[in-house]
Amino acid sequence: MRKFAILLALAACTTASAPKPAAHVARMWRGEVPLARANEYQTYLAAEGLAKLRSIHGNLGVQMFRRTVGDREEFVVISYWPDEQHIRAYAGEDVLRARLMPRDPEFLIEPDKLVRHYRIVTDR
């Protein structure tokens, strides 16, 4: 029984993940698509864009928002980072330039060429 308890304790130590560092930078991008293609774009954005962001070293999370504005659907993606150095490693020196996906021109109406970075001052 004692050996089993020791094994359980060791397993807990090896499977417990270290806490993520706090996010200090939120990177926000927005774009609009024709309302008729909104669901298709959401699927594409989730599979290609959000999945890629989540896989980048240093990424602490990502969210997608959408809302209807007339005959268009607006999408907002916010990704969270510990600092701009981690963003630079993925985005390059011009960290405020939007990184569009290959099929974005097929969907987006006048895509934003720049993103916005915000310092996170409160996180509850």
Image (cartoon, grey):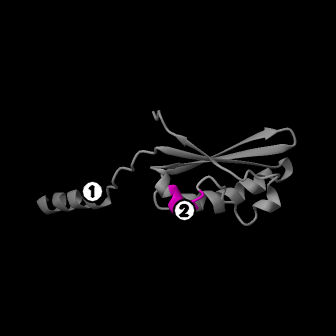
Q: Judge by depth and name the residue closer to the eye, 37 or 107.
A: 107
x and y percentages locating residue 15 in the rendered image: 32, 59
In the rendered structure, does residue 89 fall within the stretch colored magenta?
A: yes
Upstream in the sequence, badge 2 or badge 1? 1
Q: Main secondary structure of the magenta part?
A: helix
Work out which residue is located at the far front of the displayed protein and give it: 93
In the rendered structure, does residue 120 fall within the stretch colored magenta?
A: no
Residue 59 appears in the picture as rendered:
no
Residue 101 appears in the picture as rendered:
yes
Of badges 2 and 1, nearer the viewer stands 2
- Amino acid found under the numbered disc labelled 1: Ala
* Residue plotted at (58% across, 62% down): 52
x and y percentages locating residue 8 in the rendered image: 23, 58
Left or right of residue 110, residue 101 in this image:
left
x and y percentages locating residue 87 in the rendered image: 52, 56
* Residue plotted at (46% across, 57% down): 58
Q: Residue under circle 1?
A: 12
Q: Which residues are magenta?
A: 87-94
x and y percentages locating residue 40 in the rendered image: 77, 57
Q: Residue under circle 2?
A: 90
Secondary element under disc 2, as helix, strand or loop, is helix
